[in-house]
Image (spheres, rainbow, N blue to C red):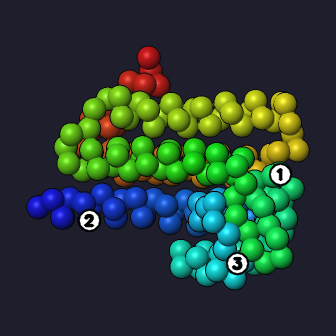
Amino acid sequence: MSESIDAGAEEILIRADRRVLKTLSPHARCVVLVLRLLGSEEISVADLEARIESFGFKCSRLDEIIDMLSYYDMLECRETLCRLSSAGRELSGALNEFLHALRRLVYGAVRGSIDEDMVASSLVATFASTLGLIESYVEEPSMMPLYLPLHLYIAGISTVVLAQLARVSASVLDVVKRFWLD
């Protein structure tokens, strides 16, 4: 029983991730994937490209994305090897922390042990991303090519996951409605 619940939860997460990545522009998709797939250890650009392709996508302008992320001090590259800088690890860590919280939400809903705070937390994360994007634009408009793709991904995957969960658990939709009405 637990295996089928876990498989159901993973299916929700995979479908939401794929759906949102497909709707992003090629540029935005590549930014998100690079930040999700790179770590503190150097890997070759060819290996990074293979990891991206393992998700079912291609980044035809990967070199441009790497240059942009390097310009914003998110990546450290030498020759054909790249890794996340400390700022890049911080941004990637925040994205992965958000995805981990979303994973806990999905597992809780599928197992029938979801609480209102878990749903509200997902909604607050999306709102915080919007607020962060606006603040970043006011303070440093040149960073928009970096932050906008992340915001679109966060808002998109949160919305898709909550929509899918609302089909599994009526309490999810009730919490979402109450959150926006209160």
User: Callout 2, which amino acid?
Assistant: Ala
The relative height of residue 8 versus residue 51 in the rendered view (above or below) is above
Q: Residue at x 72, y 47 (%)?
A: 87
Residue at image mark 2? 7
The relative height of residue 121 versus residue 143 in the rendered view (above or below) is above
| Image disc number at residue 72 | 1
Q: Residue at x 61, y 61 (%)?
A: 39
Asked which quadrant contains residue 10, the reply is bottom left
Asked which quadrant contains residue 170, the reply is top left
Q: Secondary structure at mark 3?
A: strand
Disc 1 and disc 3: Cα gap in Å? 20 Å
Residue at image mark 3? 44
Mark 2, other Cα within 10 Å: few <14 / some 14–19 / many ≥20: some
User: Callout 1, which amino acid?
Assistant: Tyr
In the image, 161 versus 150, the foreground residue is: 150
Q: On the picture, is 8 further left or further right than 164?
A: left
User: Callout 3, which amino acid?
Assistant: Ser
Q: Secondary structure at mark 2?
A: helix
Asked which quadrant contains residue 46, the reply is bottom right
Q: Position of residue 14 (x, y in %)?
A: 42, 64
